[in-house]
């Protein structure tokens, strides 16, 4: 039975400090909950407002779901999962590194892209938004079950890696003109400041997505769309 | 002077029916307002909470700006512009066509991508979200000053065009395996249903962005990131 105390407890998981102290996070929506269950995330609690729900969900009323949900329009599924122990950094294959990404929607988009393009690990700088933020989880549409985010001192990690490191810079070489290694780290910078001064010394190859007309005053692409173009190029 | 009546009038511009009846839309933020002023959009009113504002803005208090703004965190600039007379459809160069895009953030992202990749016209199906929706305008970050959205019966327009028509389909050919024409229409389908049955007969070439592992259950990319990858391929 879902008690008022439990509702209050799960509500607090919107905040990072409670996610950390409880070791729990929330995923909503059928696709998200399904992907995390299938990825063997450890389940704390699963609720559904459907009378015949899947994955052994406890059935609750729509009114209770409205109290639980973090969404404007509640979905029929609300799952509480244990935050898994972080993977070890794997210095092989294609890796994405994020330097100070602050927008939850952008991180969610990039996790989904990594899933599509077969990138199992994302190395996140310590100031990148928490991947268990409910808005991130929502935007991944289940990809968080297949892609891991590892929070690390990014400059130090890039200093130590044996993989070639690519990064996007306004003054970089055109993406299409570069030989792209099949095993590499691809660094994407923050929405407002790009790649930080601490990280940029460890970028071996500066690359750029050319705009069509140099005279156009538009000065940047959204980091999610830039990541899409870069990952498609690495996988083409 | 900004009166209470004016505030009420501009507030209503959040709704499409009032934008249509007044022929006005709102843009906020320095970049957005600047780009529209520079693109010679006709100005109805410009307000700024800065004492030394640009473009002849009327200075208002921060309290008044809070009453005006559509944003959670108001910017120092609030502009009201006249909706321009729609351009004529131009059947040349690279054109993006959108079939039922409903999310304002996605349309904003695609307008910005079109700006980056030199696509001056977007043909929007009549059920695509209004490009003067404040969330769209915000997401374009000024690109609406350089890219036009034309709302049209998309199936009819594609039937009549002499340009080759490409579209994204799950069962399409891999993007990298196709000869991409430099003058073409690229159709992107809606977030939930893809390209509609009414439009698909007019697509000459079905294309697809290959995922890395066919066994991965992820079934689609966000339409904004898909558009990014497709446009980069057409311009590479």
Image (cartoon, coloured by chain):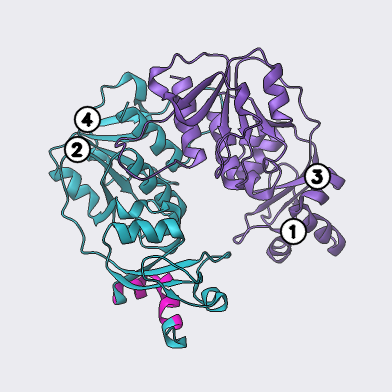
Chain colours: A cyan, B purple
Rate crowding at label 3 as few (under 14), some (14 to 19) or many (20 or more) other CA atoms within 10 Å.
Answer: many
Disc 2 is attached to a residue of which chain?
A
Where is residue A2? Give x, y as percent.
44, 83
Residue visible at 68% across and 49% down? B134
**Mark 2 or 4, nearer chain start:** 2
Structural distance between the alpha carbons of marks 3 and 1:
20 Å
Q: Which residue is mark 1?
A: B60
Disc 4 is attached to a residue of which chain?
A
Q: Which residue is mark 2?
A: A93
Rate crowding at label 4 as few (under 14), some (14 to 19) or many (20 or more) other CA atoms within 10 Å.
Answer: few
- From the image, state whether disc 4 or disc 3 is nearer to you: 4
Structural distance between the alpha carbons of marks 1 and 4:
55 Å
Highlighted range, magenta: A7-21
Same subunit: marks 3 and 1 = yes
Judging depth in this view, the residue of A155 and B24 nearest the camera is B24
Q: Secondary structure at mark 3?
A: strand
Where is residue B153? Give x, y as percent.
74, 30
Mark 4 and mark 2 in contact (Cβ < 8 Å)? no
Same subunit: marks 2 and 4 = yes
Q: Which residue is mark 3?
A: B24
Quadrant assignment for the N terminus of chain A: bottom left
Residue visible at 20% across and 64% down? A85
């Amino acid at each position: 039975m879902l008690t008022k105390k439990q509702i209050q407890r799960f509500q607090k998981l919107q905040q990072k400090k409670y996610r950390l102290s409880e070791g729990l996070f929330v995923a909503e929506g059928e696709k998200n909950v399904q992907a995390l269950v299938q990825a063997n995330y450890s389940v704390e609690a699963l609720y559904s407002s459907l009378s015949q729900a899947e994955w052994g969900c406890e059935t609750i009323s729509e009114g209770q779901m409205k109290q639980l949900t973090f969404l404007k329009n509640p979905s029929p599924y609300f799952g509480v999962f244990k935050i898994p122990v972080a993977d070890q950094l794997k210095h092989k294959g294609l890796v994405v590194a994020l330097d100070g990404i602050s927008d939850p929607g952008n991180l969610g988009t990039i996790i989904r892209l990594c899933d599509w393009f077969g990138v199992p690990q994302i190395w996140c700088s310590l100031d990148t938004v928490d991947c268990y933020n409910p808005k991130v989880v929502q935007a991944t549409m289940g990809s968080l079950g297949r892609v891991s985010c590892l929070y690390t001192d990014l400059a130090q990690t890039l200093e130590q890696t044996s993989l070639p490191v690519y990064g996007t810079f306004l003054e970089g070489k055109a993406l299409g003109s570069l030989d792209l290694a099949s095993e590499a780290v691809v660094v994407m910078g923050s929405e407002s400041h790009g790649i930080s001064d601490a990280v940029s010394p460890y970028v071996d190859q500066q690359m750029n997505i050319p705009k069509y007309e140099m005279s156009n005053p538009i000065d940047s692409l959204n980091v999610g769309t830039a990541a899409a173009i870069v990952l498609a190029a690495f996988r083409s």
